[in-house]
Amino acid sequence: NAGVMQNPRHLVRRRGQEARLRCSPMKGHSHVYWYRQLPEEGLKFMVYLQKENIIDESGMPKERFSAEFPKEGPSILRIQQVVRGDSAAYFCASSPPGFRENIQYFGAGTRLSVL
Amino acid sequence: QKEVEQNSGPLSVPEGAIASLNCTYSDRGSQSFFWYRQYSGKSPELIMFIYSNGDKEDGRFTAQLNKASQYVSLLIRDSQPSDSATYLCAVSQNNDMRFGAGTRLTVKP
């Protein structure tokens, strides 16, 4: 049973370009979460999605950031017109259905560097 | 007020000692509580979860939950240098999880 798969592991973009981060949840998991972590800081919640639905995007910046979890395929976190402040580690986590058993399992992360 | 608060540390303990990590949360409706360990440059990995008041033990780790005080802790017995990492407290309600900033633990040989 493969774990949460994120790609790419490292992504380098120049200012103004688009960054697209992918996350495939664990088999059987229907909930996907995206977090951002700046160096030496904690995990900041960004968005919580289920298939074809955004459940909670209270942590997403209002501009340039978007996320989706289509019926088929991985979840995508898209950052348009990246700026240097977007440089961070972006972690995806997934969890199975059900409220109580909300154990989130993390992918290895995507390290975004904006030049 | 932050939703989940932890002492940032660093917390330093000698090898073999008990490390005590603390966490408070603001949402009384929180249902599930988690401790994750994160090594530098790596992703968080789950150590313990607890749902009910009281203690839960797993090997050298004990999680303690007090919902009345909105407090959850993690005890690590017989601390090892390999336990040196950042420990993240997480609190969840209805599948929404919020993390504390983490406590950095150093276990000195």
Image (cartoon, coloured by chain):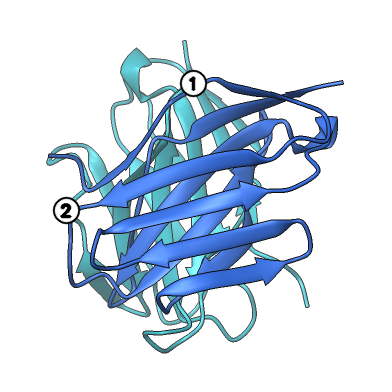
Chain colours: A cyan, B blue
Percent position of residue A57, x then y: 20, 57
Q: Is residue B102 left or right of residue A48?
A: right
Percent position of residue B59, x then y: 79, 64
- The quadrant of the rendering that contains the C terminus of chain B is top right
Mark sitting on residue A58: 2
Asked whether the residues under the numbered discs 1 and 2 touch, taking CB atoms below 8 Å apart as contact, a structural biologist would say: no
Q: Is residue B87 left or right of residue B97?
A: right
Chain letter for mark 2, please.
A
Q: Is residue A74 above or below residue B44?
A: below
Q: Residues within 10 Å of mark 2 (few under 14, many from 20)?
A: few
Q: Is residue B24 above or below residue A115?
A: below
Q: Residue at x 47, y 52 (%)?
A: B73
Percent position of residue B74, x then y: 55, 51
- Specify which label sits upstream in the sequence, 1 or 2: 1
Residue type, label 1: Glu
Q: CA distance from mark 1 to mark 2?
A: 23 Å
Asked whether residue A27 appears in the rendered view, the answer is: yes
Q: Residues within 10 Å of mark 1 (few under 14, many from 20)?
A: few
Q: Residue furthest right?
A: B109
* Res A5 quadrant in image: bottom right
